[in-house]
Image: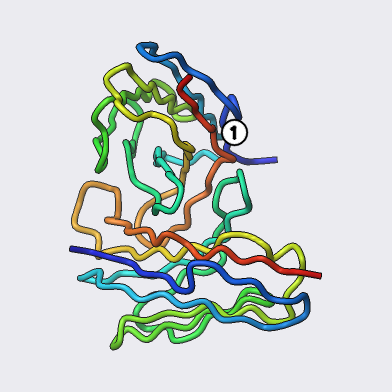
Amino acid sequence: KNQVEQSPQSLIILEGKNCTLQCNYTVSPFSNLRWYKQDTGRGPVSLTIMTFSENTKSNGRYTATLDADTKQSSLHITASQLSDSASYICVVAGRYSGGGADGLTFGKGTHLIIQP
Amino acid sequence: DGGITQSPKYLFRKEGQNVTLSCEQNLNHDAMYWYRQDPGQGLRLIYYSQIVNDFQKGDIAEGYSVSREKKESFPLTVTSAQKNPTAFYLCASRAGTGWVPYTFGSGTRLTVV
């Protein structure tokens, strides 16, 4: 069964500090891995999309890494800001096999709180 | 501004009623999707549509229905057959498949009273 496990479930850090969120997956065959940011009561917003050939991708203060061999990804946030408080969702896409839905498997998210 | 609009933001339904959630996009995207989000759970796919007048069931389609009469619109009806409809509903769209990112709406929170 395809699964995406995220850790920690929740995290509280002080403003200005760095943090790293983890994502382990068992989706096979693998196509790509996405990180989304979801503010409370809002829809998710895409941060990065990585294929199996990419090890690192950055989007401003967000840097995602991918190790397709160990099936692990991380999202590193540098110099956190109060606006980074949100849930961060890891999403893994299986290789397209027809049907149009991509076989996306969503993690439950890491709830991040930035304290002043 | 291009985007995807969901309405209403909050919806209350009595048991036994059908309700319809609106999703409109002006991004000229072909594909549209409906997801359900429950506390502590990952998003789950309800229905999706790749082209007008065609749609497919997702993982949890029972108790839901959709239509795709226009490219811009993909309404979701939550029927009385859905046993546990209280949830946050997200509509998404994208221009193609594969590595193309999804654009999500702001969601509708449905509560059964």
Q: Is A31 rendered above or below residue A53?
A: above
Hey, which residue is sitting farthest front in the picture?
B113
Quarter of the picture containing the N terminus of chain B is top right
**Which residue is disc 1 drawn over?**
B5
Q: Is residue A89 left or right of residue A40?
A: left
What is the quadrant of residue A25 in the picture?
bottom left
Q: Is residue A2 left or right of residue B44?
A: left
Element at label 1: strand
Q: Is B79 rendered above or below residue A94?
A: above
Q: Nearer the viewer, residue A55 or A71?
A: A71
Amino acid type at image mark 1 = Thr
Q: Position of residue B43 (x, y in %)?
A: 40, 49
Which residue sits at x=74%, y=62%? A83
Which residue sits at x=19%, y=57%? A97
Which residue sits at x=24%, y=30%? B62
Q: Nearer the viewer, residue A53 or B17?
A: B17
